[in-house]
Image (spheres, grey):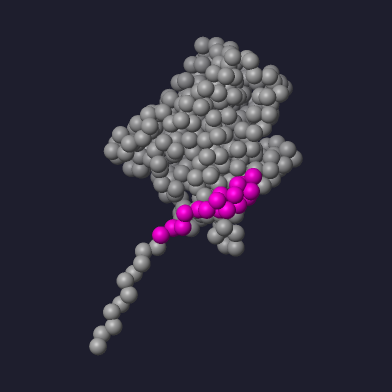
Amino acid sequence: MTLERPLAVPFVARMPSRADHARRLVIASAAAVVALMVNSAVPLLGPLLVALLLGVAAANTPVVGRYVVDVSPRLDKFLLRAGVVLLGLRVALDDVLALGLPGLTVVLTTVIATYAGTQLLGRALGLPRDLTTLVAAGFSICGAAAVAAVESSIGAKTKDVALAIALVTVFGTAMIGLVPGLGHLLGLTDEQTAVWVGASIHEVAQVLAAASLISGGAAVLAVATSVKLARVLLLAPVQIVSGRLCRGADGRSGPLVPLFVVGFLVAVGVRSTGWVPGAALSAAGSLTTFLLSAAMFGLGTTVVARRLWPVPLRVLALACLSTGIAAGVSLALVVALV
């Protein structure tokens, strides 16, 4: 008599419940509050970076990791998209146009060169198209927020998203002290250095931190911020191009312009009317930072060391080269035009 072996039952991931979503919202919100408090005490540590690191630490702590890894990704994505929409309220077209033709040329040329150059280099290095596109978007536009926004359109692998975010965070943070220091050594004026900072460094918070190291006070900070926000404005076209590039290549389908990108553009238009009171803009700015910080915590929980390590040398090479393009092209243009 032979005993029949029981059929193997495939594992099916449990769908998050409302309680799971609520628990994740509380944890992500707490992480965002902590990140804002740390940033208040140490301005050089941007809240998005701190929240991301908190997520990474939680994901790689055995006792905590099982409660935060792969939990409620839809909520994390919602927080990110809401933050990106509100990010549009920081961009006023008048401020962007005030940069004049030289400033706009620096921004547009740097973004195009960094994005296109990273795509070509990624292909030459034999890296996956999705990973290359995430790095290209993050390094050319606005760091982790751009990576997450583009990921929403191309449906990249979680590992690729986590790797791109980790790289853009590390390289952008390294540039906070490097770019202002090199600007001083190269004999650039405060204005030129501010434009270079805004055009080359990845995250908005990183740009603010770097600009604070330049003498010149509020005027220099305003220049660097305007240049950076001009790059942020290009998030919409870069997101659309990335979606078509990846989906078209692999036969995937999706909306040409996701709803949250439309919301971002509408927010830019609303801000540009000048009708929104300053108090409302200030509140929206705080909410934007809070939402993006909470979303970055969620993205940080995808950075599980055992899944990412070791980082492929080709990916590190791409990150180095992409940073070099952004810094080199913008520096050349600043010297020639500003």
Measured as percent of width and height from the top left, residue 247 is found at: 33, 36
Taking the image as drawn, is residue 32 in sight? yes
- The image quadrant that residue 286 belongs to is top right
Q: In which quarter of the image is the C terminus?
A: top right
Which residue is at 43% across, 46% downward?
160
Between 197 and 288, which is closer to the camera in this rendering? 288
Residue 24 part of the magenta segment? yes
Which residue is at 31% across, 71% downward?
7
Measured as percent of width and height from the top left, residue 22 is found at: 59, 49
Q: Which residue lies furthest to the left in this view?
A: 1
Which residue is at 51% across, 41% downward?
77
Q: Residue furthest right?
A: 41
Which residue is at 26% across, 85% downward?
2
Q: Is residue 254 above or below residue 221?
A: below
Mark count: 0
Measured as percent of width and height from the top left, residue 216 is found at: 71, 21
Measured as percent of width and height from the top left, residue 132 is found at: 40, 39
Taking the image as drawn, is residue 168 in sight? no
Question: Which span is picked out in magenta?
Answer: 12-29
Q: In which quarter of the image is the N terminus?
A: bottom left
Residue 330 part of the magenta segment? no
Q: Residue furthest front?
A: 18
Q: In this view, does 79 lie above or below 217?
A: below
In the displayed structure image, the side of residue 130 where residue 24 appears, left or right: right
